[in-house]
Amino acid sequence: MSLQRTPQSRVFVELVPWADRGRENNAVSGGEALPGLRRPVSSAQAQSATREVHVSGTAEVSAGPDRAQVAVLVSSTKEAAAEAKKSVCRRLDYITQSLQQQGLQAENVTVTKDFRRVENAYHMEAEVCITFTEFGKMQNICNFLVEKLDSSVVISQPQFYHTPGSVENLRRQACLVAVENAWHKAQEVCNLVGQTLGKPLLIKEEETKEWEGQIDDLQSSRLSSSLTVQQKIKSATIHAASKVFITFEVKGKEKKRKNL
C-alpha cells in the first residue's frame, strides 16, 4: 500500500529557532534524562540565529514578432534579350523608388537578378526582398504595389520572425518579473506575521520555458497562405515562463522610538 505524499508548502517562515536538547542529556528532578525534548533557545541565541522565509515566484511574458519579410518577384520572357531586361528593369526601378519614397532604408532592401535562356526565348527574373519593422507600413506598401503593378508582380505572404536579441530580452524579463513576484509574496507573508523582510540570501531560477503561440485548431487546419496578417502575428508570438526560488532574511519588527 503506497502512502500519499504530503504536498509541499510553497511559502514557509521559521520565526522562532529551536535547539535540540536531546544531546545535552540534562537530568530532571527524578534523575532521569529526557533525550527527546526540544526547547526554545535563549533570547540572545534567537537574535543571533538567522530567520528565513522561503518563497517561489513564477511569471509568464510574451512578445510579438519584431520583423517581417516580404519578397516581390518581377519576371519577363521575351524573344529578344534586351526586351526581357527592359521590361523587368522598368518595373524594378519603380518598386525601388516607391520604397525610398516610403522611407525604407537601403539596408532593409535586397535585390537579386537572374537572367537565362529558356528554349527560344530569354527569361529575366528579379526579386526584391524587403525587411519591415513597421507592419502597418508593410501592408500599405504591399497594397500600393498590387494596385499599381497589378499581375505583373508577385508579392509573397509576409514572414514574421524575432531578432535574436529580442528573444533573449524576453527570457530576462520573465526571470525579473518572477523575482519581483516572489519578493511581493515574501513581503506580504512578513507583514502578516508582524515581521520585517530583510535582504535576499539565495536567488535561484529553477525552471525556464518558452514556446511559440499557436492558433486554434480550425485555423491551423487551413493553408498558411489563407491566414490573415493578425493571425500570422499571433502564431509567431513567443511566450517565455520562469520559476524562481528565493530565500530572504527575516528581521524582527522595528520598534518606534518614543519622543522625550
Image (cartoon, grey):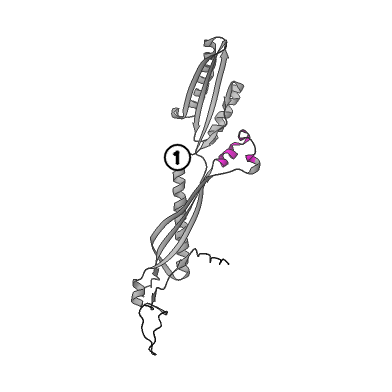
Where residue 245 sits, quadrant-wise, is: bottom left
Q: Is residue 55 visible?
A: yes
Q: Residue at x 47, y 26 (%)?
A: 110
In the rendered image, which quarter contains the C terminus?
bottom left
Q: What residue did someone put label 1 on?
A: 164
Q: Nearer the viewer, residue 229 or 77?
A: 77
Residue 160 in the magenta stretch? The answer is no
Task: Report the magenta stretch's main SS.
Answer: helix
- Is any part of residue 239 visible from this angle? no
- Helix, strand or loop at label 1? It is helix
User: What percent of the width, then of the height, locates residue 128?
Assistant: 51, 25
Is 182 above or below relative to 146? below
Q: Is residue 98 above or below residue 195?
A: above
Residue lying furthest right:
218
Question: Residue 155: image x %, image y %?
Answer: 57, 27
Residue 230 colored magenta?
Answer: yes
First to last magenta residue range: 219-235
Q: Amino acid at mark 1?
A: Pro
Residue 19 to residue 175: above or below: below
